[in-house]
Amino acid sequence: MGATPVPRSLQVLLAVAAGASVANVYYAQPLLDQLAQAFALDRAAAGAVVAATQAGSVLALLGLLPLADRGDRRRLLRLQLLALVAAVLWLAAARTAGWLLSGMLLAGLLGTALTQGLIAYTATLAPVEQRGRVVGAVQGGVFIGLLLARVVSGGVASALGWRAVYLLSASVTAVLALLLWRRLPALPVPALPPRWRDLLGSMWGMLRTDRTLRERGPLALLLFAGLNVFWAAAPLPLSSPPLHWSTAAIGALGLAGVVGALLAARVGHWMDRGFAHRVSLGALLLMFAAWWPLLGLPQSLALLLLGVVVLDLGGQALHVANQALLLRAPGEQHGRLVALYMLFYAVGSGAGAAGGPWMQARHGWPAVCMLGAGIALLALLWWAVWRVAAFTASAAVRSGRVDCR
């Protein structure tokens, strides 16, 4: 396992598949007005559409993703690909509000399970000396898929209606399923697969004892809280006077984050060369510094774009570094570790998405920037405390060895 380098073509295929999978969790966000009209929903009920996809994501992390540590990961990914095609077709055919919500739940469930399952599979497949760059490449695909989902969804729905978005997704997923069916290498299967209940029970123990998870999980929570403070709050001043940006223009702002995602893909190479802590420190400093140019909104578009690139670059670099460190663990733990890490992500994302708009509505954009910078500073302090603790423990061990001699 992990002896043969992963071909570049397979890395690209895995990245595209992960990006296409995660897009199903986010396609619905620009479609709420169309869905509200099509199913006679008021605005409060329309919000349940997005909530259903997010609920599916949480269920995937708690229920499906740990199955990646149970048996044949290639077989599981194949089954999930086929199930995702069926779920998206079910969603596209929805005729009632209940049918729609069930489809959104399944799209979130299977889209998340498949995305994170592909990352766990990739980490186990790649040799140790290549793991950081391969995981970084696939994670870059996830982030680009997340960003492009809203743009593609809004454009396709404007021209062809909301159902066309999911029919297109089903077609793309079916093609990727065929390609992956042929290209995915087999991985070793446990001689005695653990029970699903035992896998779930072991996750609490991993959370208590895995030092990397206890350090990097809260960092993920703070990281995604900071990102979502910006992305949830920014549409409010952008759509208000004097800017009056359209929904399409606000969505297109996310494309600036692609630059950060592409640059962050390089992080995996640095991780493989042993620069984990330098990468983490640099990423945290970028996330803190990004709030200075972002403070220029609405006066300067150039400063806004600079801030978006720097914020997303720092965020994605730290995310790749976190996962690369976590996935240095034995391969049979990768599914559960990714699931636990992404639960921190989910909590942070929700907190940031709630806090950013509240701060903007009550205190204005400068207060949003202060909140984001404060979260970044807290993350930097959290990382520093763990580094000092690690240095102190290492010094104590060295001192003990000297005394023993």
Image (cartoon, rainbow, N blue to C red):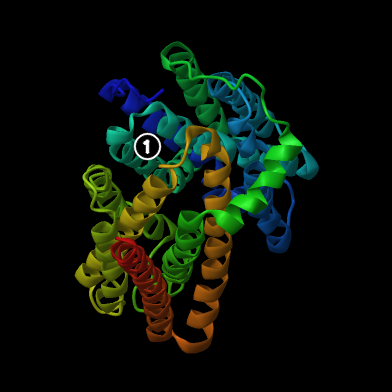
Q: Position of residue 54 (x, y in %)?
A: 63, 51
Give the secondary structure at mark 1.
Answer: helix
Q: Position of residue 405 (x, y in %)?
A: 29, 60
Please say if 309 is above or below 130. below
| Residue 20 in sight in this render | no
Q: Residue at x 54, y 51 (%)?
A: 342
Q: Which residue is mark 1?
A: 138
Q: Residue at x 27, y 47 (%)?
A: 271
Residue furthest out toward the front = 405
Residue furthest out toward the top = 182
Q: Residue at x 37, y 85 (%)?
A: 366
Residue 351 appears left or right of 282: right
Viewer-closest of 132 and 107:
132
| Residue 94 in sight in this render | yes
Q: Position of residue 231 (x, y in %)?
A: 43, 64
Please say if 128 is above or below 403. above
Residue 87 appears left or right of 178: right
Type of the residue with mark 1: Val
Viewer-closest of 57 and 167:
57
| Residues packed near mark 1 inside 10 Å, few (<14), some (14 to 19) or many (20 plus) | many
The quadrant of the image that shows the N terminus is top left
Q: Position of residue 134 (x, y in %)?
A: 32, 35
Q: Residue at x 31, y 75 (%)?
A: 291
Viewer-closest of 9 and 320:
320
Residue furthest out toward the bottom = 363
Image-quadrant location for residue 328: top left
Please say if 354 is above or below 260. below
Viewer-closest of 345 and 396:
396
